[in-house]
Image (cartoon, helix red, strand yellow):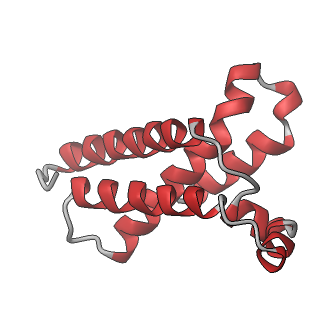
Amino acid sequence: MLGAIVLGLASRRFADQLPPWLAEHAGDALWAAMIYCGCRLLRPGRRIRFAGAVSFLFCCAIECSQLYQADWLNDIRHTTIGGLVLGEGFLAVDLARYAAGIGSAMLADMAALHAAGSNRT
């Protein structure tokens, strides 16, 4: 989870030094991977697929909330932490980025569990 946070922030901070496709997509994918890791930490006994589904639904809810543009909510979004958590504006492509980030995190999780000898997918 910490790795996803550090890499996600770095992808925004050093975007000009990354390939354009990576700079454009990595931050959202890593944010979603971080959400997945948080779900796994909160409920480690649940199946990986459950954590993936909950994470994706959460990410979709946050993205759809960006369609609501109340002044008070936009004031929060314009803060650093508010922008990182709530985003700025709805982009449908973000849903694909979230799916890619969560899917990658799920694959890494499954690989780690397989290496440890567990089969709780």
Camera-nearest residue between 69 and 11? 69
Camera-nearest residue between 78 and 32? 78
Task: Look at the picture and state if 9 lies above or below 24.
Answer: below
Dividing the picture into quarters, in which one does residue 62 lie?
Answer: bottom right
Task: Look at the picture and state if 65 lies above or below 73.
Answer: above
Camera-nearest residue between 116 and 100? 100
Q: Where is residue 114 in the image (x, y as percent from the top left)?
A: 19, 44
Q: Position of residue 107 (x, y in %)?
A: 32, 39
Q: Report the label total.
A: 0
Looking at the image, residue 100 sits to the left or right of residue 79; the answer is left
Q: Kindly identify the residue that appears in the image at 41 percent across and 54 percent down.
A: 56
Looking at the image, residue 62 sits to the left or right of residue 103; the answer is right
Looking at the image, residue 67 sits to the left or right of residue 35; the answer is right
Q: Where is residue 61 in the image (x, y as percent from the top left)?
A: 50, 62
Looking at the image, residue 94 sits to the left or right of residue 99; the answer is right
Q: Where is residue 2 in the image (x, y as percent from the top left)?
A: 59, 60
Task: Look at the picture and state if 102 lies above or below 47.
Answer: above
Q: Kindly identify the residue that appears in the image at 67 percent across and 46 percent down.
A: 7
Dividing the picture into quarters, in which one does residue 29 lie?
Answer: top right
Q: Kindly identify the residue that appears in the image at 36 percent across and 42 percent down.
A: 108
Q: Kindly identify the residue that appears in the image at 48 percent across and 42 percent down.
A: 101
